[in-house]
Image (tube, rainbow, N blue to C red):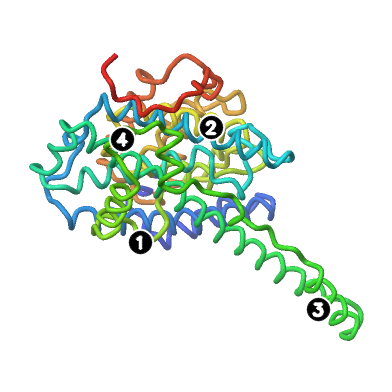
């Protein structure tokens, strides 16, 4: 009976339930949960807005618009180029690290840019009318041009978002310092310290990373001569003028994974409290990378994919001792809130099945040998 009642509680009652259940939790964990809830709500809102914009362009869009073979090869190429660019950046900046999981916010050459580029590619193709989408399933040069354009835009959008996040963090740190100064012994001393801190602070320059322009990207990818800078720029104008093009942050499964990230893994047995430690964040991200290469989840929303990969990562973790159904329910409530949607549960279980079947046995895809020539791999092998 209690389980039946929980399925029908309102959002406000659910909040009261969480407060009562988590009353014994440490205050630091409660603050973490509140911050996570705020971040996830913002991501869900953006995801819904982007989905609505894509539907406005075409009512017939679906994964049938995608060429599965070409898409898989292009995504592999995306990872290859991004790794090569990251290595170039690391060589130019000695303190930069080459580990994909430890790239700082000032480096857009990471898995996030690949997910953003793929999102742009999929959403654009699925928003096209069937007749126009058919061209990109059959015309190899046209698909190569579109894929190259999406990577260029994906790198720039990722850098732009990282710059915004960096500036926001700096503003929060300055605000926190100012609040701390106000609690000092004298107002005069506080003002002197604030002035000194403001004059000596050096904000991180996230825009200092050089993103390849169209000419450079075409050169390092050894693109066919039929694709020129003018073609790429024209494709950029076409994509950015499309109603399906995002006018805010591109939401990916990685955003939901990172929103639940914390210093350690915690899955509450009595509430919808889930946090992911570094190892679980990396495993969930690895699963998301692996599933990005296939089309089985291309029509799923990022939140559904995130729920599936997080549940699967926790099921493989040594830090958690719960069955799959219990993990799925807690992750679901951590992302989607109190209301249970049977359709969402079905989609999540289907995504989990795809993960079990489609993820390679390798524990680290990033360790595969990276070719030195970055051809767009669409030629028949």
Distance Cα–Cα, label 1 vs label 2: 27 Å
> Which circle's residue, 1 or 2, is located before the other in the chain?
2
Q: CA distance from mark 4 to mark 1?
A: 32 Å
Q: In what element is the residue under mark 2?
A: helix
Label disc, if present, on residue 225 of the rendered structure: 4
For the residue pair 265 and 80, the one nearer the viewer reads as: 80
Q: Residue at x 40, y 31 (%)?
A: 222
Cα distance in 3D space between marks 2 and 3: 46 Å
Kind of element beneath mark 3: helix
Residue carrying label 3: 182
| Residue 367: percent from left, percent from top | 56, 20
Q: Which mark is residue 83?
A: 2
Query: Horizontally, is 295 left or right of 214 in the view?
Result: left
Q: Nearer the viewer, residue 78 or 275?
A: 78
**Element carrying mark 1:** loop
Would you say residue 326 is visible in this rendering?
Answer: no
Q: Earlier in the sequence, mark 3 or mark 4?
A: 3
Whether 362 is drawn above or below 198: the answer is: above
In the rendered image, which residue does mark 1 sit on? 247
* Crowd around label 4: few <14 · some 14–19 · many ≥20 (10 Å): few
- Cα distance between the residues tagged 2 and 4: 24 Å
Where does residue 47 sit, x and y in percent of width and height?
Answer: 35, 53
Q: Quadrant of the N terminus?
A: top left
């Amino acid at each position: 009976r209690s389980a039946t009642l929980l399925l029908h509680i309102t959002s406000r009652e659910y909040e009261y339930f969480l407060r009562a259940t988590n009353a014994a939790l440490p205050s630091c964990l409660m603050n973490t949960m509140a911050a996570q809830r705020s971040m996830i709500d913002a991501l869900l809102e953006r995801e819904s807005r982007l989905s609505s914009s894509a539907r406005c362009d075409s009512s017939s869009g679906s994964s049938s618009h995608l060429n599965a073979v070409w898409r898989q090869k292009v995504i592999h190429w995306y990872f290859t180029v991004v790794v090569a660019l990251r290595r170039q950046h690391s060589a130019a900046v000695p303190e930069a690290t080459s580990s994909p999981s430890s790239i700082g916010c000032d480096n857009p050459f990471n898995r996030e840019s690949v997910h953003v580029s793929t999102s742009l590619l999929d959403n654009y193709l699925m928003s096209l009318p069937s007749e126009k989408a058919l061209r990109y399933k059959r015309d190899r040069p046209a698909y190569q041009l579109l894929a190259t354009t999406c990577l260029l835009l994906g790198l720039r959008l990722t850098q732009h978002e990282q710059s915004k996040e960096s500036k926001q963090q700096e503003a929060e740190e300055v605000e926190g310092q100012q609040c701390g100064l106000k609690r000092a012994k004298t107002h005069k001393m506080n003002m002197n310290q604030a002035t000194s801190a403001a004059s000596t602070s050096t904000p991180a320059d996230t825009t200092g990373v050089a993103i390849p322009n169209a000419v450079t990207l075409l050169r390092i990818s050894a693109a066919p001569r039929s694709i020129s800078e003018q073609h790429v720029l024209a494709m950029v104008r076409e994509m950015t003028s499309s109603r399906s093009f995002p006018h805010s942050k591109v939401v990916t499964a990685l955003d939901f994974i990172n929103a639940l990230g914390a210093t350690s893994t915690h899955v509450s047995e009595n509430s919808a409290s889930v946090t992911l430690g570094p190892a679980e964040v990396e495993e969930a991200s690895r699963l998301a990378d692996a599933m990005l290469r296939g089309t089985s989840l291309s029509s799923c929303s990022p939140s559904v994919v995130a729920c599936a990969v997080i549940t699967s990562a926790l099921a493989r973790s040594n830090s958690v001792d719960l069955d799959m159904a219990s993990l799925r329910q807690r992750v679901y409530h951590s992302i989607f809130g109190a209301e249970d949607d049977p359709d969402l549960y079905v989609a999540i279980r289907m995504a989990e099945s795809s993960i079990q079947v489609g993820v390679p046995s390798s524990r680290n895809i990033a360790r595969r040998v990276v070719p030195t020539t970055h051809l767009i791999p669409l030629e028949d092998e």
